[in-house]
Image (cartoon, rainbow, N blue to C red):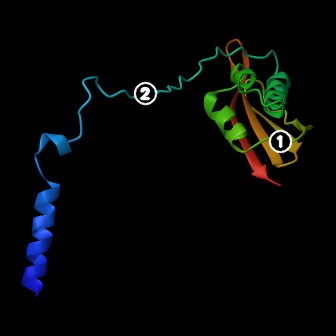
Amino acid sequence: MIRRAAVMIGVLVLMSCSSDPSTTAKQSSSPPTSSTTTTTTVPVTVPISPAASPTEAATRFANAWRDGNQLAALTIALPSAVQSAFGAGAPGFTENRGCNRPPPDSPVLCVYRTAIGELQIRVQPQADGWVVDQARVSPA
């Protein structure tokens, strides 16, 4: 009984694999069409425009972050500082808490209170002005 069932299944399989041209699907002479979309993200390089003072550099950076303007932030800060602040999310608001007053030509630390925490900015002196080289957001 089992053998007869296996034979019947084999016959059905062979019949379905017929090479009779009348049962073969017609092939199209035109090539298959496909659509491919490629998206490439090119990193934006923005020239840094140093500020005249450490307070101005910190303020420009904090305002750019508050406004969600990464390009503006990149004009005053290193990319790693921009990524650090913008990666923390939107601040909601920024309130300047002040900057320290270290000896001349030393890095200056500035602090801003925000809705998501405290923004700590380090501003570094350059030959032609001041730029933000570090930023960190500490959760509220």
* Residue shown at the point (83%, 30%) measured from the top left: 67
Q: Which residue is mark 2?
A: 35
Vertical side of 101 occupied by 6: above or below:
below
* Residue shown at the point (59%, 18%) measured from the top left: 45
- 85 or 121, which is in the foreground? 85
Quarter of the figure with residue 86: top right
Mark 2 element type: loop
Quarter of the figure with residue 109: top right
* Residue shown at the point (53%, 22%) measured from the top left: 42
Residue 94, percent from left and from top = 89, 38
* Residue shown at the point (10%, 60%) measured from the top left: 14
Q: Which residue is mark 1?
A: 91
Q: Residue furthest top?
A: 128
Q: Is residue 71 left or right of residue 113?
A: left
Residue 77, percent from left and from top = 69, 26
Closest to the camera, between mark 1 and mark 2, is 2
Which image quarter holds the N terminus? bottom left
Along the polypeptide, which appears first: circle 1 or circle 2? Answer: 2
Mark 1 element type: loop
Vertical side of 83 occupied by 117: above or below:
below
**Residue type at mark 2?**
Ser
Q: Is residue 65 left or right of residue 127?
A: right
Mark 2 surroundings within 10 Å by alpha-carbon count, few (fewer than 14), some (14 through 19), many (20 or more): few
